[in-house]
Amino acid sequence: MHKQDADITVKLTQTPFADYFTKLQSQLAAGTTACIVSMQSLRLPAFKDALEPLGPLMKKAGFDESQWNPGALKALQVDGQQYAIPYGLSTMLLYYNKDAFAKAGVPAPTNDWTTSDFESAAAKITAVDGKPAFGQSFSDLHMFSMLFAYNGARPVTDAAKLDLTNSPMEQAFTWYSGLATKEKVSSIPASSSDVPWGEQQFVAGNVAMAVDGDWNISSDATQAAFPVGVVALPQGPNGGGTYSANSGFGIAKSCQNKEAAAKAIAIITSESAQVEQAKAGTHPARLAADDAFFQALATATDKKSPGYAAQAKAAMEAASAKSVPFISTSSWDQTTKLIAREFILAYSGSESADTALQNVQQSSK
């Protein structure tokens, strides 16, 4: 930071992700938060009133939106106002075990795979392996992206209101939970605390397919003991694509020197900074850092899974072309806890999909 601006000092403080937003809320209430805060797009509606709109500040600091992925910027806006500058961009993808597909005699999935293709492959692999082929989840992005891909179902309205009982959502969630209760092709979380179940079971080799974000596109391939492939999510006849989400840096309204904070954000999200982040495995929000990301990915993965980096790039481009920012509510953290508690009952067949949706909807009011 001092090499760029000797008048600015940035002190880095870190909190585990599971505790971050609870701690941030307490600090904002007490007026003790830092000037610059990290903000996730899913949580932005709940925190926007405590953050400074960045338009005029970032313009003065030299911000040029043409240098950024438009989707990455949009995900951190509310009502057209930019509340954080992104340091990454994430979309949801389908990861698969190449060996499991070959063993079952199932052609590898493609970026134009359909929901019917997915169901057929899951049934054949389950029959050959003797265990469910797909890792189910109640993690918000992982699960709701599959429902959105199935028929365009959305859990939240454009006005940021929870809407779990609309007809497309009931149809999509009935299909998704039925992968376990009816089709018997999906592995369900062991408990409501096993939120990242699907992706963890995939990397462990216990399921052949799972949905995960592109933030794990390198680690999933390097940590798994089998060759990994990745494609865009399978789409239903009325599928909507996939959701995107990201995180960025915002400025607290309580900050006493907002112009200096904006200068600091311009430096830590500069092209050179984003290139270094890309080399470390973060998909950059700046367009100029894209090549560095995929070159680093090839170095990390292609020896084990030849062609993986090129496949990942094609999958991410296909997913990005159909991605929309995930809109959450101002009480999303509470809703996700209710989802975990209720949806596992639908996955296990202890209650119907409609009842699980209704219970979360009513309890969230």
Image (spheres, helix red, strand yellow):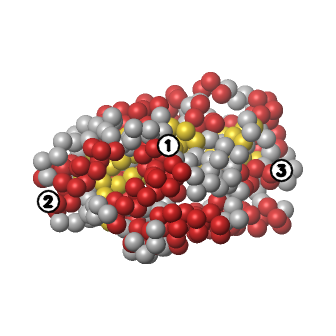
- Residue 152's mark? 1
The residue that disc 3 covers is 253
Residue 301 against residue 12 in the figure, above or below: above
Q: How many other residues sit within 10 Å of disc 3, few (<14), some (14-19) or many (≥20)?
A: some
Q: Earlier in the sequence, mark 1 or mark 3?
A: 1
Q: Three-letter amino acid code at disc 3?
A: Lys
The Cα atoms of the two marked residues, 2 and 1, are separated by: 32 Å
Mark 3, mark 2: which one is toward the viewer? 2
Which mark is on residue 128? 2
Q: Residue at x 74, y 54 (%)?
A: 47
Q: Nearer the viewer, residue 13 or 58?
A: 58
Number of labels in the image equals 3
Q: CA distance from mark 1 to mark 3?
A: 36 Å
Q: Is residue 155 left or right of residue 29?
A: left
Mark 3 to mark 2 CA distance (whole Å)? 57 Å
Q: At label 1, which amino acid type do we have?
A: Gly
User: Secondary structure beneath disc 3?
Assistant: loop
Q: Is residue 282 visible?
A: no
In front: mark 2 or mark 1?
1
Give the position of the C terminus as an image quadrant.
bottom right
Q: Are marks 3 and 2 in contact (CB under 8 Å)?
A: no
Q: Is 64 on the left-hand or right-hand side of 50?
A: left
Specify the label residue 315 is tagged with.
none
Foreground disc of the pair 1, 3: 1
**Residue 95, percent from left and from top:** 33, 49
- Which residue is found at the position 76% from the left and 50% from the top? 48
Element carrying mark 1: loop
Q: Amino acid at mark 2?
A: Val
